[in-house]
Amino acid sequence: MAKLLGKTALVTGASRGIGRAIARRLAADGARVAVHYGSNDRAAKETLQAIEAAGGRAFSIRAELGKDGDVDALFAALDQGLSGQPLDILVNNAAAGPAGPIEADTPEAFDRLFAINVKAPYFIIQRALPRLRDGGRIINVSSVCTRISTPIQTSFAMTKGALEIMSRTLANALGGRGITVNTITPGATATDLNEALFAQPGAQSLFESMTALGRFGQPEDIADAVAFLASHDARWVTGQALEASGGIYLGPREALPAQA
């Protein structure tokens, strides 16, 4: 497919996991992809190699989010890589993980979480807007924890809730330019970052029992949904949160016993 031929895309946090799968899928659809990463040079190189081996086009951008000057560094590298081309697609995927339950959280961890998960995407969008073509796409990666209460993810869920509100507000603000703004909300997804969690005894059967489709999500499941939102097919979809979770925690999987 070449639905995105001639388009350019920036995917943050694209060296591993869901971000890598998104970058690979957008490149497979024809986009030239800027692969942003924080510090893992080897992982970023692997993403580029995978894209190029499949016939796609990409370049890498290193910028550690959540630090002073992060957005400046990101866009200096992006502008150099794009060489004057405008931007068509922005995917804010980079995020810091949960800092733990409220009893164990700290002001420092809380501030870092909001700096990476909320402040960074907000100001990345701000800086991207002059570069983003009319009719462009902004896609922010949220989490199913905005719908499901998980005690160890309170501050993390707060950041993702803020991201969804930002997306809905910007969808209205940018509609005049034909720019769509949506969020994608993954559920339990098998990535290297989640490997230790899912490897705990009973974790796999627990998540599978809570999910309507009966399995973990794969990064490609999320990437395919992002590709839809990035395409012309989603031209009439904006301000929405598209859950790509396999139907996690929709309710009891077994029928309730009949009343006597």
Image (cartoon, helix red, strand yellow):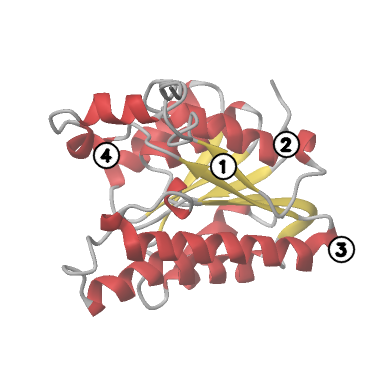
Identify the residue position indicated by label 1 in the image.
33
Q: Nearer the viewer, mark 2 or mark 1?
A: 2
In the rendered image, residue 64, in percent from the top left (x then y), is placed at 35, 63
What's the CA distance linking mark 1 and mark 4?
Answer: 25 Å
Are discs 2 and 4 less than 8 Å apart at CB?
no
**Label 4: which residue?**
194
Across and down, in percent, residue 72 comes to 49, 72
In this picture, is 232 found above or below 106? above
In the image as oriented, which residue stretches furthest toward the left?
Answer: 201
Left or right: 187, with 180 as reference point: left
Q: Which mark is residue 231?
A: 2
The answer to which of marks 2 and 1 sits earlier in the sequence is 1
From this view, report whether residue 254 is shown above or below residue 46.
above
Q: Is tag 3's residue or tag 2's residue first in the polypeptide sequence?
A: 3
Q: How far apart, in angstroms, are the residues tagged by discs 1 and 3?
A: 26 Å
Specify the quadrant that holds the N terminus: top right
Q: Which mark is in front, 3 or 4?
A: 4
Q: Residue at x 37, y 34 (%)?
A: 189
Measured in 3D between alpha carbons, the distance from the residue under mark 2 to the one under mark 1, in whole angstroms, is 14 Å
For residue 176, the mark is 3
| Mark 4: secondary structure | helix
Q: Nearer the viewer, residue 52 or 93?
A: 93
Spatial CA span between label 2 and label 4: 29 Å
- The amino acid type of the residue labelled 4 equals Asn
Amino acid type, label 2: Ser
Give the residue type that dot 3 points to. Gly
Query: Circle 2 — which element?
Result: loop
Say if mark 3 contacts mark 2, CB within 8 Å.
Answer: no
Which residue is painted at 43% across and 25% down in the image? 256
| Side (left or right) of 134 relative to 161 | right
Q: Residues within 10 Å of mark 3 (few under 14, many from 20)?
A: few
Amino acid marked by disc 1? Val
